[in-house]
Each structure stands twice: as C-alpha cells, then as structure tokens.
Amino acid sequence: MQEHIFYIPLIHLEHRFRKTYKLCHGFSLLSFPDDLEKEYRLFGHSYFKRRYGDQIIKDIKKTYCLEYIQPPERFKSTGEVLYKLEDPIITFLIVLRLIKPTEAGFKGIFFSPALTEGLPFEFIDYRLSSFHPRTLDEQGQPVKGQEFEKFVEHDLANITLYFGRLLELLKNEFHYRRLFNTLRYFDLGYRSNNIDSRLINFSIALEVLFKPLKGKLTRGMCERISHFLCKTDTDVDQIYRRFVEIIDFRARIIHGDMTYVDLSKPDKVELVHDLEHFLRLSLQKIFRHDDLIETFSSLSEREKYLTSLRH
C-alpha cells in the first residue's frame, strides 16, 4: 500500500549546506521537494492561489522542511492528520527553542498523495515568533546584525537528541506531565507578543520546576536555580542576585505596579531575556540526563534532589 508523505515547511531555519538529516521516529529534515512544488503549481484551487499563491513556495524554498512518512490506513481524514501530527510538530518547534533563541516557525502542512481529491495540502500557520530582536541599543532599537543566531551544522546533533527524547516521553505524557507543563509555558512565552505576558509565562515554567513546597518563594527559587545551574560559589552568587531582580520585576507586574515600570527600557527587556536563558539552560540540563528527567517528573523526588544541592 502506498505511503503518505507529509511535509511541514519551516521558516527561518536556514543552512548553507543543504542536506537531508534523518531525525527519528520517521521524521527527516530536508529541502522542500521539487515534485511537491510542481504539484502545488498545477493545483488550480482559486482560494489558495488568491490568498497565498506562489509566495508560499518562494518562502519555504529558502529553508528546511520536516518530512514524515506514514501508512495511509492510520489517518482517515485531513482533520485526523492535523490532530495526529500536532504533538510532534509543536514538539519540534519547542526543540529548536530549547537549543537557542529562534524565530523559526511552521508555514503549513503539505501531503502527497492527496488525502482529499483535488486538495494536495492543508494550510496552517504557526508563524509565532519572538516579539522583538534579541539586542536593543540605548534607544530601544534593534542593533544591526545582532538578531537571532542561525542554526548551523553542529546544532543538528542536539536537535536529533532532544526531538527523540521528547517524542519518547510523549508516549507516556501523563507520567511526565510536570515536564510537559513546563514546556507548555515555555512555548506560551514564545508565543506572547508583549514583554509582560512573556515574563509571566517563563516564570510559571520555572516555578513548575523549582518552586519550593515550603518557605519563602523568592529565596527558595533563587537558591534552587543558582545551585542547579552553577558549580562555583561565584557563579551561584551571580545567578542568585540576577534572579532576585527578575522575581522582583515579575512581582511588580502581576501585582499591578506597571505604572512605575517602563517595560520598554532595554534593562527590563534584558531581564526577560535572562529569565528565558535560565529556563532554557535548566531544560537543556534536565533533558540531557535520564535520571534528571525522572527526578523532575516526581514532586517528592524533585524535592529531595533540590534540597540536597544546597548541602
């Protein structure tokens, strides 16, 4: 029986050495296939031609495409395709964000052969990127040439590692619900279009991982995160002090004190960037070690582990 091949074009994921990379679980990273481009150009449905036209092809030919091969008997309709593919698709986008700050997103889902007569693809839009460039000058304007880093050859090893791990964990998501809750708020932070909601979502993600069950929240969070990320006393102290600033900024926002805070100032923007950075480093460390994955999936085991770090 003929297999269906699904292509999920990415945007802002470029590589000057265009190759095909096998990921895992039936996924590959490759250029958008020429045959699918021809099929799209021959497709005469006026709605898609008028609304999106050749701009879709022009955009996605510059970047990578996620390929997934699936036997057709498992998917009975285009709606089922989108439902079944949503978890791994969003997971892949989260993996890119875990590795580095990125504006990569998804342009749509194409499938061949068509599941519905006369319809070679179903268009969706996951173009949800960061709310501003990474670096701002004193006037709050983007610094030319210092936006998001591009993914390069050595990033592919980490993409494959994290993607494989998360897809495996998805098979038993209930057991790992704490970790997936963290990833959910990490994803929501990226989707936020303003600095305050971005700060709140990233903060929630870190609280899922590090919030103490007793004692003062600020001190407990700062101690746990700094000891988890650092090995030397100097680094621990530096992270601790920075995180105190972040939590104070967060408290001002959630308690309605924004009247006294200029959210657009570069120093406030950098606080949110640092929060995102600490969250990313924490998730990278956890997902690289099987024992930490299991530890942070259990509230009691997490408490024992984080308590032991301070002694």
Image (spheres, rainbow, N blue to C red):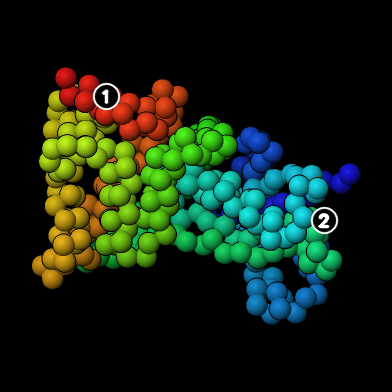
Q: Say which residue label 2 marks.
A: 113
- In percent of width and height, residue 144 lies at 36, 59
Residue at image point 83% right, 68% down: 118
Give the class, few, some or many, for how many residues have Cα within 10 Å of label 2's Cα (few <14, many ≥20).
some
Mark yes or no: residue 275 visible.
yes
Q: Which one is in front, 172 or 48?
A: 172
Amino acid carrying label 1: it is: Lys
Horizontal placement of 129 versus 274: left or right?
right
Mark yes or no: residue 101 visible.
no
Residue at image point 70% right, 74% down: 48
Residue at image point 65% right, 77% down: 51
- In percent of width and height, residue 243 lies at 18, 43
- For the image shown, how many numbered marks are present on the structure? 2
Amino acid carrying label 2: it is: Pro
Frontmost of labels 2 and 1 is 1
191 above or below 172? below
Return the disc, 2 or 1, that comes first in the chain's sequence. 2
Give SS at disc 2.
Answer: loop
Q: Is the Cβ of the residue at disc 2 closer than 8 Å to that at disc 1?
A: no
- In percent of width and height, residue 254 lies at 20, 61
Horizontal placement of 239 versus 31: left or right?
left
- Quadrant position of the N terminus in the picture: top right
For residue 239, the mark is none
* C-alpha distance separating marks 2 and 1: 53 Å
Q: Say which residue label 1 marks.
A: 304
- In percent of width and height, residue 275 lies at 27, 47
Give SS at disc 1.
Answer: helix
Horizontal placement of 142 versus 232: left or right?
right
Q: Which one is in front, 131 or 162?
A: 162
Residue at image point 53% right, 46% down: 91
